[in-house]
Image: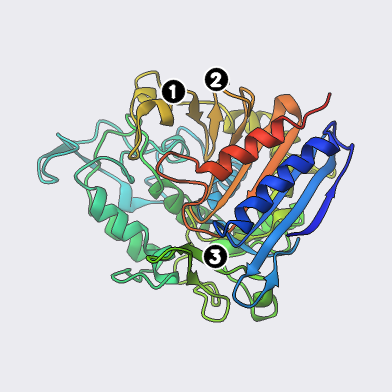
Amino acid sequence: MMNESSYGQRGGLSQGRLERLSRVLEGYVERGEFAGVTAMLHRHGELAYAATTGWQDQEAQIPMQRDTIFRLASMTKPIIAAAALTLVEEGKLRLSDPVDVWLPELAQRMVMRDPHGSPNDVYPSPRAITLHDLLTYRLGLGWGKTSLGSSLFTLTAAPIAQALQIPNAERLAPDAWLARIGEFPLAYEPGMRWLYHIASDILGILIARVTRKPLEMALRERIFEPLGMVDTSFVVPAEKRSRLAVLYGPAPEGGLAVLDHPQTTGWAEPPLFASGGAGLVSTADDYLRFGRMLLGKGVLDGVRVLSRKTVEAMTTDYLTPEQHTHATFAMSTTEMWANRGFGYGVQVVTKQTDLGPSVGTFGWPGGLGTAWYVDPREDLVALILLQYQNAIVAADWRSMIGDDFLTLTYQAIND
């Protein structure tokens, strides 16, 4: 069932062809693959498509709504990168400077001689970690194919893991967490290899220390309030709890299993550790405003958050040719970096290979069923939100709904 839809001959998109997109999204719900979906397309300065289908809470038969709140997971990362870049613009940080003065836990690093070998066989790092290294995920630590992988995953997944009540999640405040991270050697020298996730949690701590404010407050002042993102936070207060979607995952017997419910959610109280890598919740309209700001080269509705040059720097591919040959996750290199690169907290399309995003399109998905794309060439922001673990980020990088969403978005372009 399509709960709500708004589209027509706006933004250079065909109404008839957008109906194909609606039918396909409805099909995923009707087949029971997902409980509900929200999708938005903004093009040529206007909202060209906004649709909700299915259920925010399938068991209670609460329909998906335009203002439903979603757990962003890794879609938190681009917001953290943008906030860090505001500090660069103010002269409080430099991209090329070591972060040792703010993050002494990461100073004087040792590097493993073999990333897959013993963490005790190390040598001194030839240089310090810089802000540029953190923003490009090349500090030398992170989730990936190293002998530190499982230990780092257990430690750094803790903020989300504890919210979902996964056993063995460690409860650590930011300073204690960073001290634990400081106990690990680097798997690679700074700048040598792209490794996932940890950099964004570290960036969150860096932002809090430089601003001398809790991360939530720093983000509110620098990103959320200027952009009018009224529902984006690390916590869902009681008065908004009825709008939080149920988070689902695959049930062993088939169908949907509830992983996080509004009545018992881990997002009910401010977290001990506000995760810059995965902790935010938001709505479709809120995140669309963030994407529109980046599409507008740092400006939305006359309010400048970042300079044009900063947005250009954020959306430049910094991976070296050699780094493009390494797949970080359990997928082939072709599926990872052959046609994409990485800027500051976002991936960047470097080669168009199908009916989909143009070269220069950027964004980053979330592991709890969220994805967004900014395509400057098509003057487009595209957003799809659901709440199902690994619905968009799957073993093959995107599940079928992600591919279908992109194909049916781009086939609707009519100018």
* Mark 1 crowdedness (10 Å alpha carbons): few <14, some 14-19, many ≥20: some
Query: Does any portion of residue 92 appear in the rendered image?
Result: no
Circles 2 and 3: CB atoms closer than 8 Å:
no
Q: Nearer the viewer, residue 17 or 295?
A: 17
Of the residues tagged 1 and 3, which is closer to the observer?
A: 1
Q: In the rendering, at what x and y percent does residue 411 appear?
A: 72, 30
Q: Does 238 sit above or below residue 189?
A: below
- Check disc 3 and give the amino acid type: Pro
Q: In the rendering, at what x and y percent does residue 172 appear?
A: 35, 69
Which residue lies at the image location 51% right of the left edge and 61% below the top edge?
279
Circle 1 SS class: loop
Q: CA distance from mark 1 to mark 2?
A: 8 Å
Which of the two discs, 2 and 3, labels the residue nearer the N terminus? Answer: 3
Which residue does the numbered mark 3 point to in the structure image?
A: 214
Q: CA distance from mark 1 to mark 3?
A: 38 Å
* Residue 302, quarter of the rendered image: top right
Q: Quadrant of the C terminus?
A: top right
* Residue 269, quarter of the rendered image: bottom right
Circles 1 and 2: CB atoms closer than 8 Å:
yes
- Check disc 1 and give the amino acid type: Ala
Which residue lies at the image location 39% right of the left edge and 18% below the top edge?
321
Q: Which mark is residue 338?
A: 1
Q: Which mark is residue 351?
A: 2
Q: In the rendering, at what x and y percent does residue 45 appear?
A: 85, 37
Q: Which mark is residue 306?
A: none
